[in-house]
Image (tube, rainbow, N blue to C red):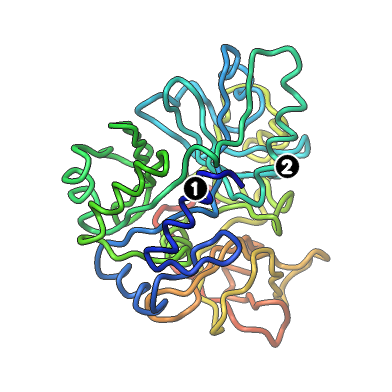
Amino acid sequence: MGSEQNNWQNWLAQQGAVLQEGRVSRFGDAEAERKAAAEGNVMIPLPHLSLLRVSGTDALTFLQGQTSNDLRQVDAEHHQLNSYNTPKGRMLALFTLFMRDGAYYLQLPSELLEAVQKRLTMFVMRSDVKIEAIDDEMASLALAGPEAATVLRDAVGGCPESPDESLTVDGLTLLRRPGDIPRFVCVAPTDRLTALWQSLVTRATPCGADVWEWIEIRAGIPHISSRTVEAFVAQMLNLQLINGVNFKKGCYPGQEVVARMQYLGKLKRRMYRVAIATATPPADGSELYSPLSASGQGAGKVVRAALNAAGQVEALVVAEIGSAEADSLYLESETGPKLTRLELPYPFEPDD
């Protein structure tokens, strides 16, 4: 981990952050933080997310041939959700991809950084492409809440107006993310983030990363962690519904599998938002059980899970459609906690 990221974590600790393995677990009372997220504005440091910078004259062509979305739609004013897959279409990583100062940036879980950088570098060959881990230069901070846009405008003079829009101002890159409440990810050198923090702290409650997990779950946004690498293809995680995959962009690893599923196959599993009747969020990749399942591979897996403001477990899960629609899903076994479907903020495709 770079010195800048260490500086950021040390500074956060001075502000009262409790850090565990590079992740902010809380600032004070975790229950109070969850309630603050339900009622007002919160800011959440994201040191558990890392950054890869891809630069060079061939960067666009290179990334276009490696990832699932169309990079021609990314510029200084627009970012996107994107994935990196095996030739069999299984996801190795899911990341936010944006532009800043003429280079491309991939924001992804720190636990996947080394493997993704190593694999991408294998395919650079003679291209003019440089792939750098830059946690020694930059870090990330999230802001969410009903007044988040106003708070940002007051603090820095502007903010992106719509989901998937970007704005870089005074060394700070702002990414507006989808969801039922305004929310932003702010990326910048540490000194810029600390200055932003100090201008926001009177108007937003500092919270731990679990609050961000819940906000992401509520927005129906999946992730890939070390426990779920190669577990899913794009449509299982609803990427076709949240602008995470493009079916007209051309070849990339796994493209044939993903396209065949979209145009010729019948989707058997997809992602749902659920409540789970347990007091402790299950780990990513935890297995689901259904007595209706005809599969020898289980009825599905947990994608991500967190406690909501009421202290109940919410999760995104990939599950067999038949079992989910029949309200017949349980965590890990037939005697495990029952799953209850909740609404996603976007509809499934009409033909599903």
The x, y position of residue 8, in whole percent, is 46, 51
Residue most extreme to the bottom? 335
Going 65% across and 50% down the picture, which residue do you hit? 267
The x, y position of residue 87, in whole percent, is 77, 34
- Residues packed near mark 1 inside 10 Å, few (<14), some (14 to 19) or many (20 plus): few
Going 68% across and 35% down the picture, which residue do you hit? 117
- Residue 94 visible in the shown view: yes
Q: Amino acid at mark 1?
A: Glu
State whether residue 162 is above or below residue 34: above
Left or right position of 257 against 273: right
State whether residue 241 is above or below residue 124: below
Q: Residue at label 2?
A: 115
Q: Amino acid at mark 2?
A: Ala
Could you say which is closer to the camera, residue 333 or residue 157? Answer: 157
Could you say which is closer to the camera, residue 135 or residue 311? Answer: 135
Left or right position of 102 against 233: left
Could you say which is closer to the camera, residue 274 or residue 304? Answer: 304
Q: Residue at label 1?
A: 349
Between the C-alphas of marks 2 and 1, the distance is 33 Å
State whether residue 213 is above or below residue 167: below
The x, y position of residue 54, in whole percent, is 58, 26
